[in-house]
Image (tube, rainbow, N blue to C red):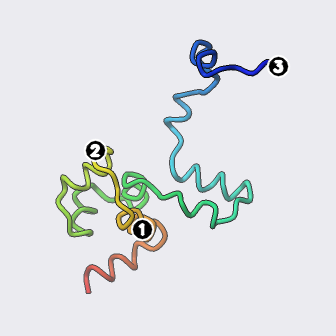
Amino acid sequence: MAKMTLADIRRSGGRVDRKQLAATTDEDIFRQAKEDGTDEKQVSGVYPTPATVRRALGMTQKDIADLMGIPLATWQNWEQGRVALDPAIRTLLKILWKDPEAVRRAVTA
């Protein structure tokens, strides 16, 4: 098989099912990594998105913004990708994802 250039790939349309790719959730990624035997340390750079965390907790945008003590618009901007997440927010998302009760205890103390 001859090597394809980027231009060749673009012309062919590629073989990626874009609908399936867009439908892949963070839960899917973590589950697949675990099924593949990927070491947790290798996945540690991956963080759940704000929307994924919120849905997993069964909260509205307003509820989770109130929990975190931030304006609703800030959370909405994070979910919509209008504002990049800094490392501290990515870490907080990981904590919310893995132990939401710890966050609840900390913010209500």
- Return the mark for residue 19: none
Query: Residue 72, how many percent across, how many down?
Result: 19, 56
Q: Residue furthest bottom?
A: 109
Cα–Cα span, label 1 and label 2: 19 Å
Q: Residue at x 26, y 68 (%)?
A: 68
Query: Residue 38, how many percent across, how many down?
Result: 70, 59
**Identity, as a three-letter code, of the amino acid under mark 1:** Thr
**Identity, as a three-letter code, of the amino acid under mark 2:** Arg
Cα–Cα span, label 1 and label 3: 44 Å
Q: Residue 41 vs residue 48: left or right?
A: right
**Identity, as a three-letter code, of the amino acid under mark 3:** Met
The one of 40 and 101 positioned closer to us in this rendering: 40
Quarter of the picture holding the C terminus? bottom left
Residue occupied by mark 1: 91
Dot 1 or dot 2: first in sequence order is 2
Which image quadrant for residue 66? bottom left
Q: Residue at x 62, y 21 (%)?
A: 14
Helix, strand or loop status at disc 1: helix
Report if the CB atoms under discs 1 and 2 are less than 8 Å apart. Answer: no
Query: Residue 57, how many percent across, how many down?
Result: 39, 62
Between marks 2 and 3 in the image, the one whose residue lies nearer the viewer: 3
Q: Is residue 60 above or below residue 66?
A: above
Q: Is residue 11 above or below residue 73?
A: above
Residue occupied by mark 2: 82
Q: How many marks?
A: 3
Q: Residues within 10 Å of mark 3 (few under 14, many from 20)?
A: few
Q: Residue at x 21, y 69 (%)?
A: 69
Which image quadrant for residue 96? bottom left
Query: Residue 6, how many percent across, how many down?
Result: 60, 22
Cα–Cα span, label 2 and label 3: 42 Å
- Return the mark for residue 1: 3
